[in-house]
Image (cartoon, rainbow, N blue to C red):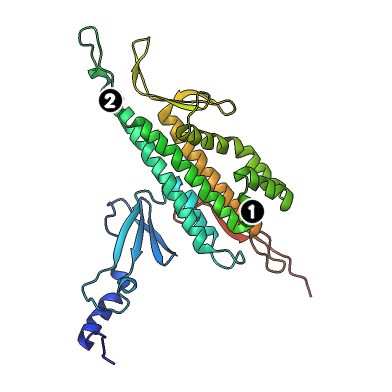
Amino acid sequence: MPDNSPPKNLAAEIARKRQAPSEMKLLGLSPNSKMLGLFGMNKRVIAVSDAALYDVKMADWIDPERTNPSLNNMQRKISKRGASSPSVSRTILTAEVLSQPGFIRELDREALLGLAMNGALCLSSMDDDSDAISAFEQSVVDNIDRIDPIGVSVIVPYHDGLEARVKSFFQSSIHCLQSLLDISALFYGDGCKKGYFEGLRDHLKHSRKDEVFSDYLKRNLNFIKFLREVRNAIEHPKLNKIMVIQNYRLLPSGDIGGPTFELIHPSVAHPEVGLPSFLVQIIDSLATLYEEVLVQLFDNNSENFGEVKFGVVRIPPERMRYGSVRYELSITNLPSIAED
């Protein structure tokens, strides 16, 4: 059979280049940013900096036959938000730290990390929408003194695409929630997803006899239902179920009113509220919900080894993984040693 392997001198050159991974550095890091760690998921490596996430593939994974001596390792920024963002630290990074092998039997870690990454990217997309809306508002504030009447009229700023941003924001929130529900199914089976989060609550209460976790979900169901009904009002508006977004406008006082949000709904109505700060609050609440559900899933399903019990514990600030992950699995009891 013909020998298709590269010549020996070429093979040596490729081997030298590819066996020096320590020389690889993350490209595009700002002077004040730094790489905080690496983890593997779904046949790729994710590099974490405080300001971004990168998908890294080694040249040998792309060209395992080593035919191209010029081939470089690949780096691709997949999120412009990194460990310093709660949208990343409370989702994918918390999942990565909690899912270290050996603590939970038969957990599909690859599936877990893939779903948690989806959650992180959805929250990051919500951050993008929120930031764009806030940045426009700041530009209006910075230039408010330049808005003068012309004759008997005044030109009021208009944020083109404002409503599209808000729609994108709430649609991403539902995708984020779905990833969290799918993660729950990795622990409890697909049956727990019937009935959405209300079904998960009932499964925990009746099948698992877990009053603590089910009560936690019960306290958060109104928030989850609100996000879902906003999405429904966006996609299937009705006279009594509709989202109302106000753009910049002139108020009776003569002031310029900023953008506002209102939900008209028979059961989860929300009064008119300033839009930029409202979106920031929703992101924080959703990121915290994601983190706390992950914590309870892992705490309730971690293995015990004899008398040694494992569970989720809070990490001291000086030891936080990636500088921002607040929880890890650890020994929760120290069994006494019997005296001889």
Q: Nearer the viewer, residue 243 or 173?
A: 243
Q: Mark 1: few, some, or many residues within 10 Å (few <14, many ≥20)?
A: few
Do labels 2 and 1 touch, CB within 8 Å? no
Label 2: which secondary element: helix
Q: Residue furthest right?
A: 340
Q: Is residue 146 left or right of residue 217?
A: left
Position of residue 338 measured from the top left corner of the image (x, y, whole percent): 77, 70
In the displayed structure, would residue 59 be above or below residue 301?
below
Give the residue drawn at x 49%, y 42%.
174
Which of the labelled discs sits on residue 148, or is there none?
none
Q: Is residue 326 left or right of residue 310?
A: left
Q: Nearer the viewer, residue 80 or 217?
A: 217
Q: Nearer the viewer, residue 17 or 264?
A: 264
Mark 1 is on which residue type?
Answer: Gly
Quarter of the image with the N terminus is bottom left
Q: Nearer the viewer, residue 166 or 326?
A: 166
Q: Residue furthest bottom?
A: 1
Residue tagged by mark 1?
191
Mark 2 is on which residue type?
Answer: Asp
Position of residue 44 measured from the top left corner of the image (x, y, whole percent): 39, 65
Question: Visible in this render: residue 35?
Answer: yes
Residue tagged by mark 2?
142
Position of residue 46 measured from the top left corner of the image (x, y, whole percent): 39, 61
In the displayed structure, would residue 150 be above or below residue 124?
above
Quarter of the image with the C terminus is bottom right
Question: Which mark is in front, 2 or 1?
Answer: 1
Give the residue drawn at x 31%, y 77%.
19
Q: Earlier in the sequence, mark 2 or mark 1?
A: 2
In the displayed structure, would residue 30 be above or below residue 333?
above
